[in-house]
Image (spheres, helix red, strand yellow):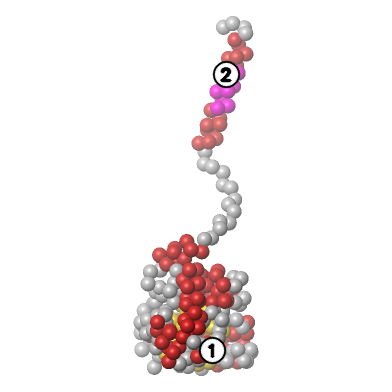
Amino acid sequence: MRVWALPLALLALVACVTQSAAHRRAARAPAIVPMRAAHVDPERLAKRLAAIQPGWPRTRSYDCGRIKCVALTFDDGPGEHTGRLLDMLRRRGVLATFFVLGQMVAADHGPHLARRIVREGHEIGNHSWSHPALTGLSDDGVRRELRRTGELVRRLTGVRMRLMRPPYGATDAHVAREARREGLAQILWNLDTLDWRDRVSEIVARRAGRAKAGSIVLMHDIHPTTVRAVPHLLDTLTRRGFTFVTVSELYERPPVPGREYTERR
């Protein structure tokens, strides 16, 4: 080898070794890099939820004609205390029915909470958009209140609601007619805890504890006093031998659109 060619040969050897080392590094498992939180597309999430729970609500099988069932229902949310309530119910394995307001679903953490209600197996129902007395509205006004909320919940969760609760329990023939057109049964109650008036947890728990077999219990998840009452009322009703069910489970079949329900007799 000529003297002037020696440096060139050494450079070629170094390049070969460097390329081989780089190739070996590339063949190794890639390093784990922290990922940024991905943007959640509500439309895609709704489709995924609908795909994993066809025919929602998927009810459990209870014979509430033979066992002591009670349906706990919560109105006017989702709000700032709903997440804590969901935590409590999940720890106890209890499912309830939430009658949501469209304007609350649209606000702040509402979309997340509505999706969580559905994801954790609770039943979700329509409580209108802005909580007016539906009996004071025209047919078109009732339709707008129900449809706007229904469309928002369906877009966020993939769920088409089958239940509604008229604000203040105010209903009549034209409200029933519009509910029927929207495919919604009217769910009222036979046990009012009056938690909106008496915001004392002990009083709310004591009233809820008076439930009888087949009762639909009215509460509001927007009040912290109600949420704090839940563990006590669950303990009381459990000791009395009750099984906690959703409204649809209480009747063991989807309630009939337009018809009023207050309890299972």
Front residue of 108 and 128: 128
Q: Where is residue 29 in the image (x, y as percent from the top left)?
A: 52, 41
Tell me which corner region of the image, top left, top right, bottom left or bottom right, holds residue 9: top right
* Residue 223 figure quarter: bottom right
Going by the numbered disc 1, the residue's amino acid type is Ala
Q: Residue at x 59, y 22 (%)?
A: 14
**111 in relation to 37, above or below:** below
Q: Is residue 156 visible?
A: yes
Residue to which mark 2 is pinned: 12
| Residue plotted at (56% across, 47% down) | 32
Q: How far apart are marks 1 and 2 (CA)?
A: 86 Å
User: What range is drawn magenta here?
Assistant: 11-19
Q: Give the residue number, with chain letter if any, for mark 1.
A: 133
Residue 169 visible from this viewpoint = no
Task: Give the vertical position of 156 relative to 253 (above or below).
Answer: above
Q: Is the magenta stretch mostly helix, strand or loop?
A: helix
